[in-house]
Image (cartoon, rainbow, N blue to C red):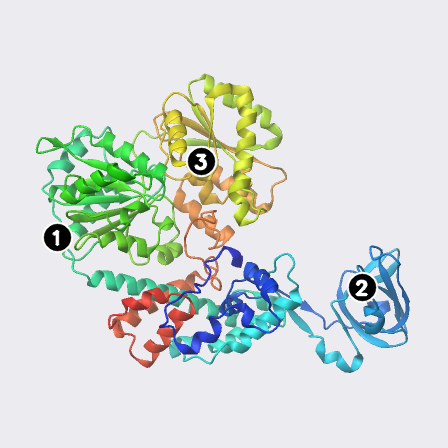
Amino acid sequence: MPSARRQPRLNRHRPALRPEILFPLFTPTTSLPGIGPRLAKLVEHAAGPLVADLLWHLPNGVIDRRFAPKLAAAPPGTIATVTVTIDAHFPNESRRLPYRIRCSDETGFITLVFFHVKGDYLARLLPAGSTRVISGRIEEFNGQLQMSHPDHIAAPEDLGAIQAVEPVYGLTAGLPLKVMRKAADAALARAPALPEWLDPALLQRRDWPEWRAALHAAHHPERPEEVDPTTLARSRLAYDELLADQLAIALVRAHTKRQPGRRTIGDGRLTATLVERLPFALTGSQRQAWAEIAADMAAPERMLRLLQGDVGSGKTVVALLAILGAVEAGAQGALMAPTEILARQHLATIERLLAGVLDNGRPIRVALLTGRDKGRARDRLLGELAAGDIDLMIGTHALFQDGVAFKDLALVVIDEQHRFGVEQRLQLAAKGVGVDSLVMTATPIPRSLQLTSYGDLDASRLAEKPAGRQPIRTSMVSLDRLDEVIAAVERALGGGAKVYWVCPLVEEAEPGDLQMVDLAAATRRHEALRERFGARVGLVHGKLKGADKDAVMANFAGGGIDLLVATTVIEVGVDVPEATVMVIEHAERFGLAQLHQLRGRIGRGDRASSCLLLYQAPLGTVATQRLTLLRETEDGFRIAEEDLRLRGGGEVLGTRQSGLPGFRLADLAVHQDLLSIAHDDARLILARDPDLATPRGRALRILLYLFARDASVKYVRAG
């Protein structure tokens, strides 16, 4: 299961409507005994800031202390609990040197080893001549048994204080396992008895325990196999989390569908001109998606549709056809992108596509709004938008800010929705009346993740690439052959190609330092390549200011830069058809789907393209599978399914910034069947009890708050 650090934290600032029965779980971990401010920071780093976070931070292993041999039968490398007599102490004057204690039983001897010993602590804990029960890992040093810093020491009469089987939790530097175990047990003691929210027939069919019993079992495994996500306790908890997610999505969908819609029906004059002027014929899947979107827009209900297409499949053209349909009907469209680079890329692409497309003799008016627009220029732009003088406004998050008003917004198109939240989509749609929503993503998403990320949307898929696109030849090359790769890049540049060189994400770094590590790696590679190729080499990364980033990309698309060294900032949306070579350094450190996205930056013209996956030998089994599959196929949907299988739901897309829902208890690579059941269950619940007013409905409201999906409660029909 993905590490807790990568999951969304539970919000401390939830509305006061949270049921009082949950109050003990939504308090800081400092409210637990023994967790002061210093330890609370470590616990937050490992699990989260709230007591509830500790409930979801399940053990990932067990330590079995039930093996209690005589010393002669205690094999090195095992964890054992032995009963010994304390024979003698051998302290050292320097605390830097080990403090040794010789112990024995009737069959042999063992030495206990301690470092950094203060005062007479050990003399009081292990007095010579006493009998003690010691538990820890048996080691061998110079042919003699030893145990360094035993985990537990107790007098024989206190043997019950040594837990026979102990859960092992994910930790962070400086956080002892014993502290985490005590904190988790204290959190469990706070868990209230809650009304059952699951269907009784499902509980009986699956033989699942009730919620609190499942939590207790999950936190107290007796055997290593009991930390498996498919155990009864963990499956039940995973289903609880999935049901909360699917119910929240269903509530948002039901709320949006209840809002008054509008019929947006164009006369075809602009879309026909665009199709006629395109330099290529629409693919079959583009025509089908366009027909589905047009039918949704013509219906009285609001459109909520996902347009899912692999890299280079032509989503922008389909979206533009939908926008032109709104313009034909006398309304406006908005297109929101997650970054300024992508917004400007859309502006350039759409202006190129619309060249020569006239509306009653005048050009289609397209404008761009970003956070960089200030003062009078921004005021003038917003005035033209409110007056209806702009047909299509392209922008970033700036679009849904206060003060941005449309005369008649009919269609919202959101690119790479997983970079935004559902609330942001609703904010933008609220700037018009009955606004239709079209969400686009170039990230191939397995069906299971589609349910969790876009479960409130109908879906259209573009399965073909436009005619004329050449396949991309993908090769795996060891970093030992870096000089050969640079020579190949030199030949490509000599032949007029443009080249991307992507530097790695170093997974061992702390999340807060990732961008700096990326930047350092890219900067070093840029300096090295600039020594070889001079001013033809550019550098782009996430810490550049927007204007500087745009300038570098413009020079790469134009004539100033031919070799662009970059971090993953170029992963989505950048379109330079002349770029035909992609070098990805340390490709083994990326997820499959992210590698596929990066590779999609080339092969966008009519020239053959090559992708070089540079890897550090030796490759692990999973890394070999990933890179081999990428070499074999360009099918993004197959790649995404494999990525889910190999990496698990929390890692699919390969980037921590993806914004796809993170689960603490569910693992989508394992629990796909439970997700499907939860999806159907949520729809059935709202069909039978849209107000969540029955006893089960009221219990389900508690479930939504429990898993921090309470923002969706406001969409319950009764309130």
Q: Nearer the viewer, mark 2 or mark 1?
A: 2
Q: Amino acid at mark 3?
A: Leu
Q: CA distance from mark 3 to mark 1?
A: 43 Å
The residue at the point 51 percent across, 42 percent down is: 515
Q: Amino acid at mark 1?
A: Arg
Q: At which x and y percent is residue 563?
A: 46, 25
Compare marks 2 and 3 and give the one earlier in the sequence.
2
Q: Is residue 637 visible?
A: yes
In the drawing, does residue 49 fall left or right of residue 248? Answer: right
Mark 3 touching mark 1, by CB under 8 A? no
Compare marks 2 and 1 and give the one earlier in the sequence.
2
Q: Secondary structure at mark 3?
A: loop
Q: Secondary structure at mark 1?
A: loop
Q: At which x and y percent is residue 533?
A: 51, 20
Q: Quadrant of residue 476?
A: top right
In the picture as drawn, the residue positioned furthest to the top comes out as 494
Q: Is residue 284 visible?
A: no
In the drawing, does residue 253 fall left or right of residue 195? Answer: left
Q: Which residue is under mark 2? A: 118
Quarter of the image that includes the C terminus: bottom left
Q: Which residue is under mark 3? A: 544
Q: Nearer the viewer, residue 559 or 49?
A: 49
